[in-house]
Amino acid sequence: MKRAIIMVIDSMGIGAMPDCEEFGDKKTCNTLKNVCEFNGGLKMPNLEKMGLGNIQDFKGISAVENPTAQYGTLKEKSMGKDTTTGHWEIAGQISPKPFMTYPEGFPSDLIEKFIKETKCGGVLANIPASGTAIIEELNDEHHKTKFPIVYTSADSVFQIALDTDTIPLETLYRWCEIARKLLNDGDYNVARVIARPYKIIDGKPTRISKDRRDYSMEPKHTVLNEIKDRGEKVVAIGKIEDIFSKSGITHAIHTGSNKEGLELTLQAVQGNLDLNKIKYQNLDLNENLNNYLIFTNLVDTDMLYGHRRDPKGYGQAIEEVDSYIPKIIDSMSDDDMLIITADHGCDPTAEGTDHTREYVPILVYGKNIKPKALGLIEGFDYIANLVRDWIF
């Protein structure tokens, strides 16, 4: 049984790419380095042992003489700095054309179609905004009108927020599906529709992470499809299922936190995750084939701390990831390969609340994989090639 395990620490970039200013970012952006500096150094002994500190000078993360993993830096080929382009490229699909963004809000014709199709009566906002700020600002009006809060950001996203004690969660998901269809049918080129449910907790509008759903454009063909087409398994943990619009996925489970994602990944590696419970129906899988991919997204670094510009929380989240590394490694067989990487940056010490265009780290560990310096590699799709060669 040969398995590949990909863990994406969402937004843990390691330095501005040369074209960062074209994406509205400064050359000083470096998510991991700046988080380390802000916190006076981070304690990540396990990622350090693998060679993270050999990639670059990160305060508190030392270079080691004999790293246990292959270590290096990946440069994105795709024209973007978002979740979709990053993950798609990790899986082998390059996006040379950037997704469209809407700094003035979405066109009136799209909003009119959305209101008509959903029968929601109207929308609030339709502007770029911080999600936490916009729901606080418009919560009272939302309760009064029952209109959803529609907003975007510097990323290519159509986000719909509502209080699920006012409008059912199922309605929010249905409205998101309608928005996705309208965007697909038109020439809007929007990467994701995101359901942003919230509730009033202790008198404050609070987003419910576990009920968030992403409705992405569907990729053309990735290494995930190649694995699935062979009758083998692709186990998606976290929002991976949404990022790939279920394409190339055979088993999926959503998470409400990084800790849950880490626990599920550990269970999957140990063989204790009940795959029958999370298997897609009507799949023609070859149960005699035991090679498969475990693909995990750990979103808290980005969603809870990067966008909210909380470098302290960001550092604690990375340290939590580090604490799980020994348990995952100890559970790996001789034929398992672990890849730890990121999909873009979201420097919490930078101005604004948006992603940052950055290089990302790569660590590759296997009990029979020889540690070495990988240097600078052109393309996140290096990972797709690794997975393909390993599994096939």
Image (tube, grey):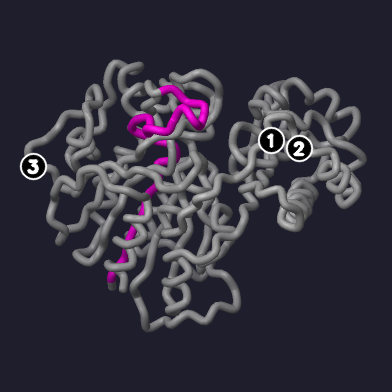
Density class for disc 2 (Cα within 10 Å; few <14, some 14-19, many ≥20) is some
Seen at 50% across and 70% down, the residue is 276
Above/below status of 285 relative to 216 = below
Residue 10 part of the magenta segment: yes
Q: Is residue 52 left or right of residue 170?
A: left
Q: Which element carries disc 1, helix, strand or loop?
A: loop
Q: Which residue is mark 3?
A: 66
Q: Which element carries disc 2, helix, strand or loop?
A: loop
Q: Which mark is residue 343?
A: none
Q: Which residue is mark 1?
A: 102
Tag 2 near tag 3, CB within 8 Å: no
The answer to whether residue 315 shows anywhere in this view is no
- Which image quadrant is residue 106 in? top right
- In the rendered structure, which disc, 1 or 3, sits on the residue that comes first in sequence? 3
Q: Which residue is mark 2?
A: 106
Density class for disc 1 (Cα within 10 Å; few <14, some 14-19, many ≥20) is many
Seen at 57% across and 62% down, the residue is 246
Cα distance between the residues tagged 1 and 2: 6 Å
Q: Which element carries disc 3, helix, strand or loop?
A: loop
Residue 391 part of the magenta segment: no
Q: What span is colored magenta in the figure?
A: 2-26
Cα distance between the residues tagged 1 and 3: 48 Å
* Residue in front for this viewpoint, 190 or 178: 190
- Residue 59 percent location from the top left of the image: 24, 22
